[in-house]
Amino acid sequence: MARFLYVVAGEHSGDAHGAGLLECLSRQVDDLKVRGVGGSRMSELTGGGVRDWVEDAAVMGIWEVLKRYGWFKKQFERMMQEVREMKPEVLLLIDYPGFNLRFAKAVRAVFPDIRIVYYVSPQVWAWNKKRITLMARLLNQMICLFPFEVDLYRDAGLKSDFVGHPLVDELEKERLDRVCRDDLLVGLFPGSREREVARLLPTMLEAASQLRDMRPELRFEVPAASEKLAVQIRNLIEAIGAEDWLEVTVGQSHSLMQRACCGVLASGTATLEAAYYGLPYCLVYRVAPLTYLIAKLVVNIEFIGIVNILAKRKVVEEFIQGDASPDKVRDCLWNLIENPDQRVVLQAQLAETAAMLGEPGSHERVAALVSESFHLHEPR
């Protein structure tokens, strides 16, 4: 008997998590039929059953979303029609809370018997704990990447499970054998989006230039997430005449995290990856002023970096908005470069925090929970 699953992921990270999950799920559920939206990896895995929309859907910031409201409304209506046609037993929502929670509400209203499973908890613990009660009414299950999230949902009556972070499997595959860190190599990680690179890389380049003045033998490397971003990065580097001492690579961020003595990173998943590999770093965060102002009104957490949030204390330095200046980044990196003992202490703290990500095998554990949902499928 065929089993029907509709899946929604709106970012590259969600596509990667979803592809690993679907690959395992196809081995656990016979005759699995999958439709939905995601990225290239899920689309290829499902033979086009999952439509690739990530390049258009993965926008950041309130203003950017508002500018594309009409497009998102059209996609929403199209997806609701696909759910009506497919009548899936399980709706799997992967991260992407701004869209996915609205979609869950619409699907629940029309199809109360569909089991709705949410994978990758939205950061409601940061910006709106009151929404947990609403989510408990809409969802059948929450699958969490971090252990501290589970009790938040269970206390609200929502079935919740910690499965560990899929990054563990992905990062272990790219761990280098017998690599030694280069005391003269510093990594600059400006993010994976064009707007992010444009906003943060100039600050990183200025800090790097000042460090070179202080210690000319230092070398710097920037890993671009794509060839397109590499062109943008090279243009910024050429504009300041840094081609001789600053190398640009493509798709080598995990390698650099294991080879550099320290680095500066855009806030995001990369900071968790760097922690896993033990790279001493500081993070920078800067968004449009309006976006930041609105975020300040709704977000109620002490830290922005996930490593500091997990540790419940400041492990790595955070430079946010106006504090994300070349001078402050320079001073932090200089301290790490000149003090190997401090790097060792920070690496131990990063390892302690990274251990909270759990053991390898998260894709299999998530697939087992989703497989169970097919057997539990019944009217609420």
Image (tube, rainbow, N blue to C red):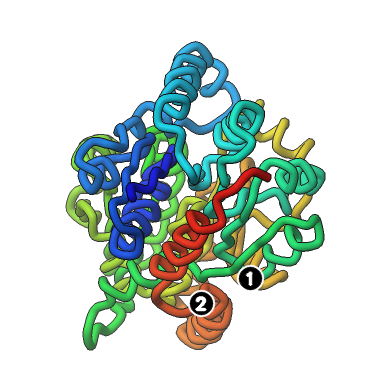
The answer to whether residue 316 is left or right of residue 214 is right
Identity of the residue drawn at 35% across and 71% down: 169
Q: Position of residue 250 (x, y in %)?
A: 20, 51
Q: Position of residue 207 (x, y in %)?
A: 44, 53
253 vs 118, nearest the viewer: 118
For mark 2, does the 10 Å Cα neighbourhood hold few (<14), some (14 to 19), or many (20 or more) residues?
some
Q: Position of residue 243 (x, y in %)?
A: 19, 48
The residue tagged 1 is 147
Disc 2 residue type (three-letter): Gly
Query: Of callouts 1 and 2, which one flags the residue occurring earlier in the amino acid sequence?
Result: 1
At mark 1, the secondary structure is helix
Q: Is residue 202 above or below residue 18?
A: above
The answer to whether residue 232 is left or right of residue 372 is left
The answer to whether residue 353 is left or right of residue 336 is right
367 vs 100, nearest the viewer: 367
Q: Can you see residue 299?
A: no
For mark 1, does the 10 Å Cα neighbourhood hold few (<14), some (14 to 19), or many (20 or more) residues?
some
Are the residues tagged 1 and 2 within 8 Å (C-beta)? yes
